[in-house]
Image: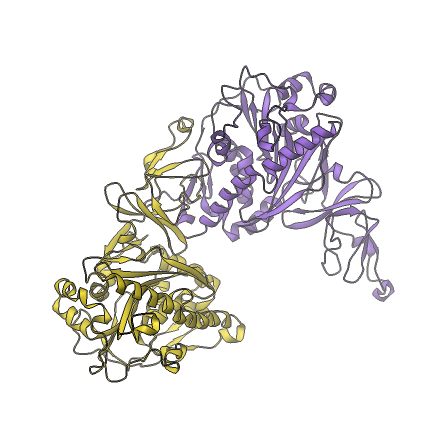
Amino acid sequence: MHTAEIAGLVDVEAGLVSPRIFNDRTIHGLELERIFARSWLFVAHESEIPAPGDFVSRLMGTDGVIVSRGAEGQIRVLLNACRHRGRRVCMQDAGKTAQFKCPYHGWTYSVSGELLGVPFFESYQGQLDMSELGLLPAPRVETCHGLIFASWDESAVPLSEYLGPLAWVFGMLFDRTNAVEVVGPPIRWVAPANWKLGAANFAGDGHHVAVTHGFVNSLGIKRTPRGRAVSYVVPAEHGHLGNLGGWPADANDGPFLALPQEIWPEMEQRLDAKQFELMRGLRVIVGNIFPNLSFLETAATGAHEWAGPEDLASMSFLTLRLWQPRGPDWMEVWTWQLMDRSAPDWWKQASRECYLREFGPGGMFEQDDMANWSSITQNLESPAARRISLQYGMGLGALPLEEWPGPGLAYAKPGVGEISERLFYGHWQKRMLSGEGQR
Amino acid sequence: MTAPIDEQLVDEVSGQVSARIFVDPDIYRDELARVFARSWLFVAHESELPRPGMFVTRSMGEDPVIVCRGADGVVRGLLNVCRHRGRRVCNEDSGQTAKFFCPYHGWTYGTQGELASVPFFEAYQGQLPLSEMGLVQAPRVATHHGLIFASWEATGPTLREFLGPIGWVFDLLFGRSEAVEVVGPPMRWIAPANWKLAAANFAGDGHHIFTTHGFRTAMGLETIRGQRLSYVLPSEYGHACTLSGWPTGVEDLPYARLPKEIWPEIEQRLTREQADFLSSLAIIVGNVFPNCSFLQSSSHTPEEWGGDPAAPPISFLTLRQWQPKGPDKMEIWSWQLVDRNAPPEWKETARACFTREFGMAGVFEQDDMANWSDITSNLKSPIANRLALQYRMGLKMDEGQEWPGPGTAYLKRSFEEFNERVFYARWHQLMTQV
């Protein structure tokens, strides 16, 4: 695919995106090479592999990897392909082991990836250097507040630099108490939709909520609080977006994202004063780390509607979601719920129930979204539909705020419309245009 | 990247093969033209079409062909494509007929492929030369011990030259008795795996058995232990075969556990040296390049096929073809063959043994398919696609001085990936030949 062709797919200034990027096979193949084989990708949360020998099987783009904690505690990300014939050496989703044994010929690797044993080794007559044939490790693995990221690009910028101001936002989500940890294994399912629709929607599509998820208003089960609220859009150089939505000043039904009061003191201790004060007025934090990791913490007003206690004005849940590309027109959705370990048990149970009802695989919000994204993916395949330009022009010309307590810059919300999606697709295009030689 | 990435697809000297050759659609398209359209390909066994007018429909690469014994008794390979609009003229798997009638406009061909009639012929106003519009014929069809091969190449080595020393091994398998014939129609099924993984595995992967088929040792069913005289046999055109002996000192039934009723035939048809050699062997397994594998296996215990533990052991003979259907898909065709004069109950037991081991749900078959399909899907993604896979076992081999057949065989001392290198070297040669 020629540079000029890629350059024509996204026009950030005009807010236009070509339908081709959502179902073209060639573009999908290039994405795997130029975006997924080179970006920092979320692979697991540290609480999933707390002890030496623990591992989970994950995907980096379409490449299968094992995320393991070695005997000495070090986290590694290893290509799940035997160096002999390429078979997966690990078929489990998660577990604890001392070694991985390939089921084809029995090559055996340590949990850190070293090649430990080869049957009939003497038949190699000294021509097999075992030290060179460990499972291929991702050259870069770094963590941020417990989130493990890996990259195949040896020269990638450090993760903290990659995340930019979003690392500060992540502090409010994942480092606010002594332990924010995953609840059970991730829930995952397959959806016939292009992965970017999920990522860009979480990056900054706030105004679909009123229509797509209009049931909450029409049924009166979840009031979107009305009134003026202080809200921000936080962009990052590497294509990430964070959206921080505030409660209306006179209708704060759940300070600190409706987290339970029991953990507020811990939060005050761990967070810096600016984070803590900002969180007091926040109702929702939602965004996307480029390319495909979305995060959401949202307060649900009227807790009892979501199986919460009758007397609780609101409660919240925190989720991470990965939109794993499986083809131009389908993805595997991976979702984790995370909780503060020190939250009371009754609150955890209510939050879990609320989360599953809203964003589990059969959750009402999840179902609403998936109906749109799968319809778009299928709809844009036909020749006439492929010629239209999709519109991302809302709020062109917005200027950054002068007042923003965090690092980097922020825009005021509402009024900036689709800026987040423009930034997402602009960065997508930049990565797609970056030279082939850099793989 | 920290891994050694090879720039060429196959390096037979160091024993490395690029992951790309198992998944790349461009390489696959090239393969159909460079490998399948230029090699002798197995299409049928003569016992499948004993009489004039009998036919089977098969594939040569992805090209559909009718293998038909014409009214004149000659076996031909006919492209199953009507010359008028390209429709298949034969939609059966097998049968006996006097003609092939295209279901679209009714062009009708005889069993020798000739265009016999065209409806409304006069409307062509004399502009349709019937004699030039027969079904396209493979220019060369030849047989060896009943195995019919066809090629789209009009010139090049004869089938006998192509098979080389494997032709001698085929004496032991297909020429050992008055008639070795197929049992019923071939079984076939689809597998989401690249065809080369299976062909190379049969060409010479002996050491996967202990891990992949480890259930045998785990359940105490393994029969072959100890020192034995075994050979690997390569050939110029990419075929390779492993002949594994019984361990020294093991007393077993002679002649690959074939029934005593056919021993006189064996002794009559094989040379003394061949017959003795056959007796010394437990397994003959290999692959005729590109995609026809064969296996004579005598090492299975009665427990494995559900027999009486006290029953005498048995063997089976199978041909398997790995038909390419895309970079990540193949159709597996599998035949069992038996010596016609073996007693019916022996045939039944051999059938049960074969079906349990290598039928489409056989335990060995399932084991293998799990690996080959996993590899095929696993190597598609960008990072795994850059791997160089390892085929370095036994880079140095010793010639077998006592080898009784033609060509050069090498001593199989432990395990080696020699035959797989032979397979991929020939593949590489055809893929890069100008």
Residue at the far front in the pictured view: A310
Give percent across and percent down for residue B242. 56, 28
Question: Where, quadrant-wise, is the C terminus of chain A in this rendering?
Answer: bottom left
Q: Residue B427 lies in what quarter of the image?
A: top right
- As displayed, is residue A120 above or below residue B71? above
Nearer to us in this view, B315 or B162: B315
Residue closest to the far top:
B249
Q: Is residue B260 visible?
A: yes
Q: Residue lying farthest bottom?
A: A227
Residue A242 shows in this picture: no
Q: Position of residue A345 (x, y in %)?
A: 26, 61
Residue A402 is situated, as x and y percent measured from the top left of the image, at 17, 78
Instruction: Determine the colour of chain B.
Output: purple
The chain displayed yellow equals A
Applied colour scheme: by chain
Nearer to the camera, B338 or B171 = B338
The one nearer the camera, B128 or A234, is A234
In this rendering, the answer to whether B142 lies above or below B178 is below
- In the rendered view, tell whether residue A99 sits above or below residue A275: above
Residue A395 in the image: x percent, y percent?
A: 31, 81
Q: Is residue B133 left or right of residue B199?
A: right
Which image quarter holds the N terminus of chain A? Answer: bottom left
Count of numbered tags = 0
Q: Residue at x 58, y 30 (%)?
A: B303
Left/right of residue B420 with respect to residue B90 in the rendered view: left
Instruction: State left or right for residue A423 relative to residue A401.
Output: right
**Residue at image coords 43%, 68%:** A5
Quarter of the image holding residue A217? bottom left
